[in-house]
Structure formats: structure tokens, C-alpha cells
Image: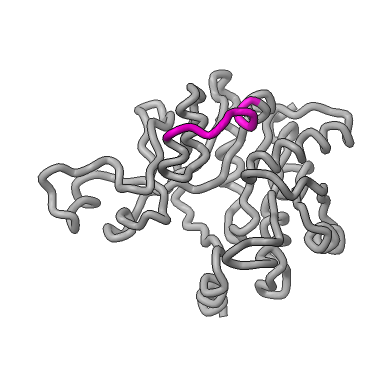
Amino acid sequence: MAIEENSLILIPARYASTRFPGKPLVDIAGKPMIQHVYEKAAVVSDHVYVATDDKRIYDAVLAFGGRAVMTSDTHRSGTDRCYEAYTKVKELLQRNFDVVVNVQGDEPFIIPEQIESLIVRFEEPAVQIATLAKPFEKNDEIFDPNKVKVVFSTNHTALYFSRNPIPYCRGVEREDWLAKTPFYKHVGMYAYRPEILKAVTSIPQGVLEQAESLEQLRWLENGYTIAVSITNHESIGIDTPEDLEKLKELIQ
């Protein structure tokens, strides 16, 4: 069986977002945002579920013909929500999966190839977790703390993630940093082996995560490895109503 056929894709989606309540259901080109994400994921796997804590999102997914599972409203992160959803789908279908993929519900312009590039990493037996990174193209963006940077080894295993620019270019003017060395933006899509997903959800927050507010640092701090695949596709995330308005201007 091809590894894609034995992969479960989960899309965590909350209604009660602080910055943008109801975000998964906003209309983009005649469809709710969550439907755009679902349809991209469904190109890769027959096993796609939205994991939500809100009946409105659950009903909307079923209305367009998708699958969804209800989860707790007390989860610390999308990873925790994914693990609960994984256990429910596994019980519902009475089957195991080789890979569990966590696709953000506010990224309507991801492409299926990005998901596929994560899944194929698990053909390597040593891979525990996989994620994506994209080269920065604008120098000023590497100084934006909302754009998370990642550095990785020669075998594409993550060394560190930070809101600060990494690496630091000593003796180089700030405006010349990107010309000096490549910088990579973390794209927040993850895939896990099921046993690793279970393990990382039981780890308490560590010093690094508390400092940077990045949950993947909890995994690195506890010795888990994160494989990094490179994508050149610029996906557009929707975090605020202003982001949505900018997006609508682009697609008109």
C-alpha cells in the first residue's frame, strides 16, 4: 500500500479565534475557507477529517460533503486536537495509519504537492515528524517576529526555530543579510508517525517554548527530530479580517 493511501489528514478548526471569530466559515470565492483547505487535502488522501470544537463548523463541513469529528474545546494546541481526532477516527474506521498530517484550516491556498512532500518523507524509517520551509525572498521579512525562521542540518533535520532572524549575520548590515545567506520561513504544516504524535502531546511546556511561544521547540527540547522539506509555493494564511480583505483584492 502506498504511504499516501495509509495517511490520515486532519484539519484542526476552531470557531472562537481571538483575532478572527468564525474564521473557518468565512466566504472565499463562494465557499467557506475550510472547504478550500479540505478539497486540497482530499486530492492527496481518501481519509480527510476536520477536527473541530464547534457544531457550526461541523455542520458546515458535512453540508459540503466532507467528514468531521467533534473534539474538546480545552486543547492547548492544534496538535493536541489532532491527536484526539486521530484516536476517534482510528476507532471509527477500525484501522491504523502510518502517517497523521496536520494541515492548518486557515491556509486556503496550500497545494496538494506540499502535503505530498511531507508524507513521502516517512518512507525514511528514521523520520518522526516532518514540516515545511520556504526560502525568504524579501530581506525585511526575516526581521518580522510573526514569520518564524528555521535552520536545519545538511540532511534537512531542524536545528532550531525562532521568531528572531537565524542565523545571525555578524558584521553585515541588516539590509544585506538575505544577500549574505539564505533564510527559511517555517510553513506550519506537520506530519507525524502516530506513536510520535501521542508522545509529543503528553510533554509539558519547556523553557524554549515558553520563551518563543512555538510548540515545536517542545519537541526539539525533548530530543525528537523534525525533518524539513522545502517548498517554493507561497501560501497565504488568514489570521485577521484585514488579511481576508487583502486576499479578496488579490483574487478579484
Q: Nearer the viewer, residue 208 or 183?
A: 208
Above or below for 2 versus 163: above
Residue at coordinates 68% horizontally, 44% vertically from top-left? 75
Q: Residue furthest left?
A: 171
The x and y percentages for residue 90 are 82, 32
Residue at the location (36% across, 37% down)? 151
Q: Quadrant of residue 20?
A: bottom right
Q: Is residue 228 left or right of residue 99?
A: left
Residue displayed at 52% across by 70% down: 243
Is residue 33 found left or right of 206 in the rendered image?
Answer: right
Q: Is residue 52 magenta?
A: no
- The location of residue 65, given as percent across then percent down, is 85, 58
> How many dots with numbers?
0
In the rendered view, would you say 214 is above or below 60?
above
Residue 102 location, x and y as percent? 64, 43
Which image quarter is the C terminus in?
Answer: bottom right
Residue 122, by quadrant, is top right
What range is drawn magenta here?
199-207
* Residue ID at (65%, 55%): 105
Residue 206 falls inside the magenta stretch: yes
Residue 81 in picture, x, y percent from top left:
70, 43
Q: List the single residue furthest toward the top.
A: 125
Up the image or down, 61 lies above or below 224; here it is below
- Image quarter for residue 40? bottom right
